[in-house]
Amino acid sequence: MIYYVSKVFWRIAAPTNALVLISAIVAFWEVLHSPNYVAWLAAAVACGLVIGTFTPIGMALTVPLEYRFAFSPPDSRAPTDGIIFLAGSSIGEIATAAALSQDYPKARLIFSGFSATDPAHGWHKIFAQLGGDPARIIDIEPPRTTSEDALYAAALLKPKASERWILVTSAYHNAK
């Protein structure tokens, strides 16, 4: 129960969301009390902020973040013990997983945040069609938070300090 309360609370209390809500309340308060052009402009801006914050339009604005930094492959001379894929369930992320699994045939493949082996989603079939070996996939119980994700991964993998891991993630993760 506390998990759901924290998600609802943070949806409202996150600094950017709180600022948007406060500006929207102030703008509409002004519109109701003085019908001038500045108040209407403030209300229009507040509506834009609310739409950008609480609809998929805000998510679309994160697309440039995905391609902001060039992909930097790790040093191929050093062996990689495993690859962790965080909360990715798009075709692009599955394609990246398949390509990396071919580049590092001995590395363990860990999917966290979604189930790559669940037949209902069909990701394992796509992964195989792209050249990956579904038998190498290790699914971590879908976590609810990043903290749980780290705890589950550490408990399952028991990594040593000498091991080398690659972390693959996205610029944006949907709030659960």
Image (cartoon, rainbow, N blue to C red):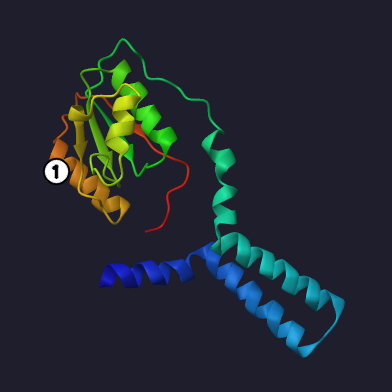
Give the image quarter of residue 16: bottom right
Give the image quarter of residue 169: top left
Residue farthest right in this picture? 37
User: What x and y, as percent, mark residue 56?
Assistant: 55, 56
Disc 1 is placed on an element classified as helix
Q: Could you tell me which residue is drawn at 27 percent across and 71 percent down?
A: 2
Q: Which of 170 and 89 lies nearest the eye of the viewer?
A: 89
Q: Which of 99 and 22 lies nearest the eye of the viewer?
A: 99
Q: Which amino acid, by three-letter code, is at mark 1?
A: Ala
Q: Is residue 166 visible to us here?
A: no
User: What x and y, as percent, mark residue 101?
Assistant: 29, 22
Q: Could you tell me which residue is drawn at 26 percent across and 48 percent down?
A: 149
Q: Is residue 77 left or right of residue 158?
A: right
Give the image quarter of residue 127: top left
Residue marked by disc 1: 155
Position of the C terminus by quadrant = bottom left
Q: Residues within 10 Å of mark 1 (few under 14, many from 20)?
A: few
Q: Could you tell me which residue is drawn at 64 percent across and 64 percent down?
A: 49
Position of residue 42 relative to residue 29, above or below, is above
Position of the N terminus by quadrant = bottom left
